[in-house]
Image (spheres, rainbow, N blue to C red):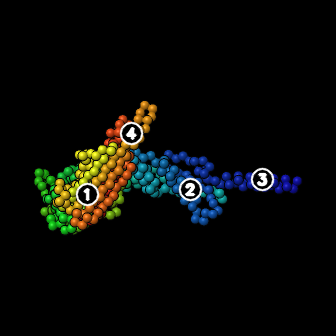
Amino acid sequence: MYRFLLSAIIFIFSLNTFTAESQRRPSWVRQRPSDADFYIGIGMAPKSRDDQNMQYARDARNQALEELSSEIKVTISANSMLRQFENNFQFQQQFESKVYTSVQQTLEGYEVHTWENRREYWVMVRLNKNVYAQRRQQRLDMAKMLASSYFFDARDAVAVGDVSRALTSYFRAVTALQDHVGEDLTHRTASGAVNYATDIMSDLRRLYRNISFTPINNHLRVEFSRQMQEPLALKAEYFSNGEILPVANLPVKFEFSHGEGVLNSQNVTSNNGEIQSTISRLVSRRKMQEVTACLDLATIIRDEDLESPLLPYFFPSEDLPCTRFTIELNKSTAFCRIEENIFGNIDPVHSFGNLIRADLNENFFNFSMDSADAEYIVNLSLNFRKGDERVGTGYTVFLVYADLHISVVSVNNGTKIFSDGFMEVRGMRPGSYQHALNEARENVLNRFRREILPKLDEVDM
């Protein structure tokens, strides 16, 4: 009887406590409010005794802000950058998500209400719709004003042929607007209406088309062990209203696009638009190498802006002015001996071996027809042999295996300075052994270029 009365008292007390707590709960906890003038977000996180840093409070607040953000309908303007690049899937994918995440990042001026008990922590945030719209418009207007100053400075620079300043100002106009890629970027100025989403891009494309890099000497022959005497030189010019103007103070970057070496280069073009670079030392021993000279954006654009996601869209590398210089290295003279065996028979015309020889000639040697004139002897051994015929239902697959070995011997002292190769390269094709042989040859050539040529590049010849 005593236990029954005790249990009843505890039950009644708990019921009263629960009822009192429920009564203390604010209405927005009991039922989500609806208000046409406000965006509303509500979040709840369970409390934990082990949570000394009140992480639950931050979790509930973040939930509420996410819910509030989801209520804000984002409309992509027809005059936005997103519409300008609507056929570029990568741009759309990258920046549509940015539009929605930027909503939460720019939230301000919202009300915060909290309620908690021993087990739960609740947060409600409210944002007046009119206040939000006004502040968003204010931020957009400020961005347009900043972009306007850069945009017209860029046009002024173009008018006087100051390409470097023009590029800098155009990019600063772009970065001023990068948080508003989905919004209407039309702007009325004293000079007339401007649509930054289209006008910056069209100005830049026109600018790129009118800049040219002309090599003064685009093919040079050099000795591997000597410093290059003749510099790589180009002239930067800008075409404006029928005139050809030299482009001064334009940063240009010279770098090896094929091969390797050490370059000493000037930083910017001179007053007559010229710039030079010299090869102080070659590292690669390849016969044909290439140096590319391109507009150096990294010098024009501030370091903090180089990570801007808009950079590759407004300043695509393929549109920037560039030119190329061919560097022909005076290589050692060699004589090539080829032994090519196809299915047990010697191939006297070296039909595949000559392809390997051509790669070696292009990259490393000048081949002589007389071994007496050679500094090196290149021995090339190729063996193609038949494998199995694998018969299936309605088809037969043929296998061919290939081995390659190459060595380079110094005529001066008879020393073998290089030796390498590979075995069991497979070709497999239906139809005939000839089809399988063709695939084996292709696989051998690819592997030779991938594995053997880089090793030859390191040999001192």
Query: Element type at marker 4?
Result: strand
Identified by mark 1, the residue type is: Val
Compared with 358, 53 (above or below) is: below
Q: Which residue is mark 4?
A: 398
Identified by mark 3, the residue type is: Phe
Work out whether mark 4 precedes mark 3 in sequence or the reverse, and give the earlier one.
Answer: 3
Q: Which residue is mark 1?
A: 378
- Could you tell me residue 230's position as x and y percent? 15, 65
Identified by mark 4, the residue type is: Phe
State left or right for residue 263 relative to residue 439.
left
**Which label is found at residue 60?**
2
Whole-angstrom CA distance, mark 2 to mark 4, is 67 Å
Whole-angstrom CA distance, mark 2 to mark 1, is 74 Å
Q: Residues within 10 Å of mark 1 (few under 14, many from 20)?
A: many
- Could you tell me residue 52's position as x and y percent? 60, 65
Front tag of 2 and 1: 1
Whole-angstrom CA distance, mark 4 to mark 1, is 32 Å
Residue beneath the point at 11% across and 54% down:
243
Query: Element type at marker 1?
Result: strand
Query: Element type at marker 3?
Result: helix
> Are the residues flagged by discs 2 and 1 in contact, CB closer than 8 Å?
no
Whole-angstrom CA distance, mark 4 to mark 3, is 85 Å
